[in-house]
Image (cartoon, rainbow, N blue to C red):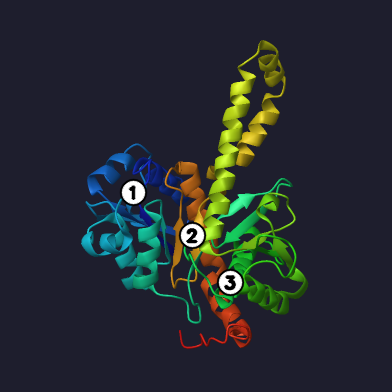
């Protein structure tokens, strides 16, 4: 049995979308057991919309409060213990048989709570967010980190690569991803001292799998499968890509409706436009996993629909089946000897 907590509050489509996603996931995965956190009356009202769900496969933990995006993360953790997110985090910490949690709630609070209350895999300096985006060749690319760590050391960036590499193998079957370091140019000497030292570490540890620096404009090219970045740059990279895709679709729609001949042409190419729309829709790619914590955490986008949240649940299930955290601990131990070489820092006791 795999037990997952589903935070049913905090998202734009909560609690309807998380409950629907959980119901569908229960139908498809016999080993899955769900723990819902949130307003019990609302959860039961949503469950009543579907065929009877086996009560032996889920439970509800009443959590009347909600952490919003306006709450400061550290204050939310302290002042809202009855929130669906904090009730979930507490259960995850104390429940030895609980494997992970899926939430579409406030990102800052989730990262802070998971890091402080759940703890890190032995050897991991900092947990890292790793969302997945599509490339133009039909593949996927992970961004490690996309917002969990604003400033990073070379050692941390090396660990981001280690964790992202294993995640891509576990969930997407990519055995040897092409790894790149996000930078202001492709030349090895580009960037500040952190990026120069990280380049050396990545080259030494991952050899030919590390293909060098990447400029932001090449994100969707298909030439890379894992991008290593500090959380500040990675977050801007991902959100710029998402925003550009949305605005281009709006512009395309506006242009199509501006002239009759464009409308006729669009009708003839409808299937192609549907494919492009699906390609650009982040809802089709699940959530951002928080790699490096002792329990599995998957953060769905705040506006996630039921399909997207169901994909988040599938991500968590696959990570557990693969025993990803044990794999990460082993990988981190294997690269420990390389850490501190260029920074002069010793992280072995962290």
Whole-percent x, y for residue 112 in the image: 37, 65
Q: Is residue 261 left or right of residue 318?
A: right
Mark 2 lies on residue: 147
Residue at image point 72% right, 75% down: 203
Whole-percent x, y for residue 38 in the image: 28, 51
Residue at image point 33% right, 42% down: 47
Label ID, residue 213: none
Secondary structure category for the residue under label 2: loop
Q: Residues within 10 Å of mark 3 (few under 14, many from 20)?
A: many
Image quadrant where one finds the N terminus: bottom left
Dot placed on the residue nearer the N-terminal end, 3 or 2: 2
Q: Residues within 10 Å of mark 1 (few under 14, many from 20)?
A: many
Label ID, residue 10: 1
Above or below, comparing residue 275 to residue 289 in the picture: above
Tell me, yes or no, whether the two marked residues, 3 and 1, touch with CB atoms within 8 Å: no
> Can residue 143 be seen?
yes
Residue 44 or residue 42, whichever sits in front: 42
Dot placed on the residue nearer the N-terminal end, 2 or 1: 1
Q: CA distance from mark 2 to mark 1?
A: 19 Å
Mark 3 lies on residue: 157
């Amino acid at each position: 049995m795999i037990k997952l907590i589903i935070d049913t509050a905090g998202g734009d489509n909560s609690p309807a979308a998380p409950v629907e996603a959980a119901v569908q996931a229960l139908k498809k995965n016999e080993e899955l057991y769900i723990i819902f956190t949130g307003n019990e009356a609302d959860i039961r009202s949503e469950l009543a919309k579907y065929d009877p769900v086996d009560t032996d496969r889920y439970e509800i933990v009443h959590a009347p409060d909600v952490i919003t995006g306006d709450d400061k993360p550290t204050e939310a953790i302290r002042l809202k213990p009855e929130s669906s997110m904090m009730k979930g985090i507490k259960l995850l910490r104390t429940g030895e048989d609980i494997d992970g949690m899926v939430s579409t709630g406030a990102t800052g609070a989730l990262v802070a709570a998971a890091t402080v209350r759940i703890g890190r895999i032995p050897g991991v300096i900092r947990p890292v967010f790793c969302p997945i985006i599509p490339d133009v060749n039909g593949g996927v690319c992970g961004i490690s980190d996309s917002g969990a760590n604003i400033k990073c050391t070379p050692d941390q960036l090396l660990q981001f690569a280690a964790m992202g590499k294993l995640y891509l193998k576990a969930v997407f079957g990519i055995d040897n991803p092409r790894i790149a370091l996000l930078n202001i140019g492709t030349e090895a000497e580009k960037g500040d001292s952190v990026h120069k030292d990280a380049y050396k570490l990545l080259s030494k540890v991952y050899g030919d799998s590390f293909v060098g620096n990447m400029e932001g404009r090449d994100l969707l090219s298909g030439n890379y499968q894992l991008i290593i970045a500090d959380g500040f740059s990675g977050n801007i990279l991902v959100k710029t890509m998402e925003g550009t895709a949305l605005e281009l679709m709006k512009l395309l729609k506006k242009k199509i409706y501006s002239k009759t001949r464009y409308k006729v042409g669009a009708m003839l190419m409808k299937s192609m436009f549907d494919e492009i729309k699906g390609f650009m829709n982040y809802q089709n790619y699940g959530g951002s996993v928080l790699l490096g914590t002792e329990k599995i955490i998957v953060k769905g986008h705040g506006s996630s629909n039921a399909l997207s949240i169901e994909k988040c649940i599938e991500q968590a299930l696959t990570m557990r089946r693969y025993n990803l955290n044990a794999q990460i601990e082993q990988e981190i131990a294997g690269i420990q000897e390389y850490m501190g070489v260029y920074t002069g820092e010793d992280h072995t006791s962290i």
